[in-house]
Amino acid sequence: MESQLWQIVFRDPNKLALIIALIIGAVGAFLVYRSTNPDTPRARRIAMAILRFIAVAVIIFSLADPVIRAIRNREITPSVVLLVDNSQSMSIVDNTGDRSVKVSEIISSKVLKNISEKYPIHKFLFSDSLYKWKEPDFSGQITSMGIALSELLDTAEKLEIGAVLILSDGQNNIGVDPEIVAMSFPFPIHTIGIGDPNPMPDAMVSEIVANPVAYVGEELTVFANIRGWRLGGTQVNAQLIESGKMIGSQQIELPNEGQVVTCKYKIEPKKPGTKYYTIRIPILQNEVLKNNNEKSVAIKVLPSRKEVLIACDYLSWDVTFWKRAIERDPNIKTSLFVKQGVGQYNLRRMPSRKEDLQHYALIVLINSAEILTGDITKRLAEYVHSGGSILLIGSENSFRGGPGIREFIGILPVNLNLSRGFVFMDIPVSSGPDALTHPITSIEGFAREVSSLPPLKGMFFSAPKENSKILMVGKTADGIDLPILAVSEIELGRSAIITGSPTWKWGFLPFAYGRDDRIFRNLSRNLIQYLLAKEKIDRFAIIPGKKVYSSGEPVYISAALRDESNKPVSGAIVNINVSLKDSVDDEGFDFELSEVGEGVYEASIPSLAPGIYDINGTAQVESKSLGKAKSSLVVERFKLEFARTNQDDALLKIISQQTAGKYILSDSIYKLLDIIKIKNKIRTESSEHELWSWPILLFIVIIALGLEWILRKKSNLL
């Protein structure tokens, strides 16, 4: 059924003005021909007035921007979309039979044929995405039902969808949550559950939990969660394996209903680097799946925790707040020296020998006047020149003069005016000239929020040195900006100074005004990390998307290139070789990364066979080598697609319920004939055609004015 309506509408918003113009045109035509000289027959005068009015009316009609609009109502029969799960789990044989056979039977069934006689049917496959229809081969490595539904929704209007049928086991293991996507569907989704909702006999390593960072010589705990279905009472040996060697084992009894048995292993890494640990249980005779009996984890082993020495003459709130801020980082170990006692038992004296100082990666000095005397100041200067870092928190008790003090001040980022001493006054703080480009102050809203920090109660007057970076400044009563936070690099070491106090209020008083300590927390963290991070930064780095991939997962590899000034390098050729670790016969394969911008290059590999892989790369620009880089990753035998093997009927039911659809079992597809009842839709379509540019309008104006001219000539009115 189809109906059509034609309308003429005007788009010009000034319709009143055009109506007035039309009235004026009509009145003008009447007045012109009400009487003529010489006198003209009344009929001729009326004819000329009408012709004049027609010409004026057509011109005004054109100025009103007229369009002719065609509105057509068309009855449409909505279509049915069939989504078939093409992932590997759909080829499992369980208690209900071969899932792939059931899918084939449904696709070729009379039920679908009868549905296709009533409604158009569009067929798609899906696994990690939505695919064009072909005969299912159940080769999909992962399942993302949410992504497939999202992509289908994008084409819903074009396909005139009235209902969706999903043939799946409901196992969704990657991507967006299909429950959330289904909530936005304006038509029902009917789900057809394939497979047994009850798990098959299976044992699997479901999860490994371990700290991703460990230290040489420090004990590390690895937890492994083992699940079992229908294997209750079976004893297995869960082994911890590194580089093909068993380094730990635990005898466990498998549960029967999918419960978790947790194994606990203690290891002590001997060398730094990325270590891969695998938890493996034996494959049992009556297990259906055999590739989920092991799982791996990558742990970055560092040489040791970095030690920070906090040295002070006496305890204060500044000492408390800075010690707490530093200890937020689990990779840092702090030691406390207090000259007036109550320090740590192994720090009865302030370390003064070169080898003692070099034990620490950073020394923080707070209220240090009694400490910075004699030979210690010289040793601290030597410590910084040889690669150490120092942070000085200034206060009225920071300096007391003496031998070596000038040498010590020489390693600070600013020239202190010690003759003036510590000046007590309210000092509001603000962002410094180097804050925008420095990693310490790369904090969202720093420039805006730092000015809201509580003012300092005093400071040392100072002037920046040539190579220092001024990150925060304080305004004196005279309106002069002086350094508050400054940093610099001294040969192999780094130094920083906060010239005023008390800084502990930055981490405390904001709470009294409804804010938090975000600025102090992030500033202290970034400052400590900057002072500790003196290792050479690689200009060329290879970064796998993650260190451990499941079998069948796409593998992502990226690289970052920077020049001597730490700026991104574009236009480079980055070649990568991926090969099995410690394999003599395997030369691996090569490929080139594509630049995605800002010195970042990326590529993806559809999947890799299980094993540990070395990644080696080279980079060059215009035949000039920028260096080499290497990394590694592991692909475990575990497949996401087989993390769970039973039909997830709960998910399929929720998807149907949220869209007013129905969930049925594969053996009950005959019910679809009664379930799928879709009413025809009325599709309203409209089209517009502009009239002002029609030649016929110009023709009417010319004819009307031409006839008027002829009549006026016959009446001797020219």
Image (cartoon, rainbow, N blue to C red):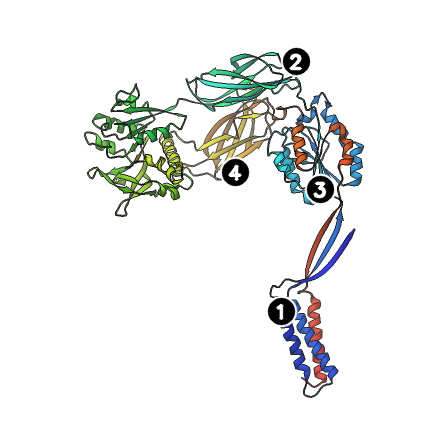
Q: How dense is the environment of label 2, judged by Cα within 10 Å: few (below 14), some, or many (20 and up)?
A: few
Give the CA distance from mark 3 to mark 4: 40 Å
Q: CA distance from mark 1 to mark 4?
A: 59 Å
Q: Look at mark 2 in the image and give the residue it sits on.
A: 285
Residue shown at 63% from the left, 67% from the top: 63
Q: Earlier in the sequence, mark 3 or mark 4?
A: 3
Kind of residue at disc 3? Ile
Identity, as a three-letter code, of the amino acid under mark 1 = Leu
- Residue at label 4? 595
Across and down, in percent, residue 156 comes to: 68, 42
Instruction: Find disc 1 in the rendering and name its residue.
Output: 18
Look at the image and tell me whether residue 390 can be seen.
no
Label 1, label 2: how many angstroms apart (C-alpha)?
A: 91 Å
Near mark 1 (Cα within 10 A), the count class, few <14, some 14-19 or many ≥20, is some
The amino acid pointed to by label 4 is Glu
Q: Name the residue at 68% across, 82% down.
A: 33
Relative to the observer, which residue lies in front, 161 or 215? 161
- Secondary structure at badge 4 equals strand
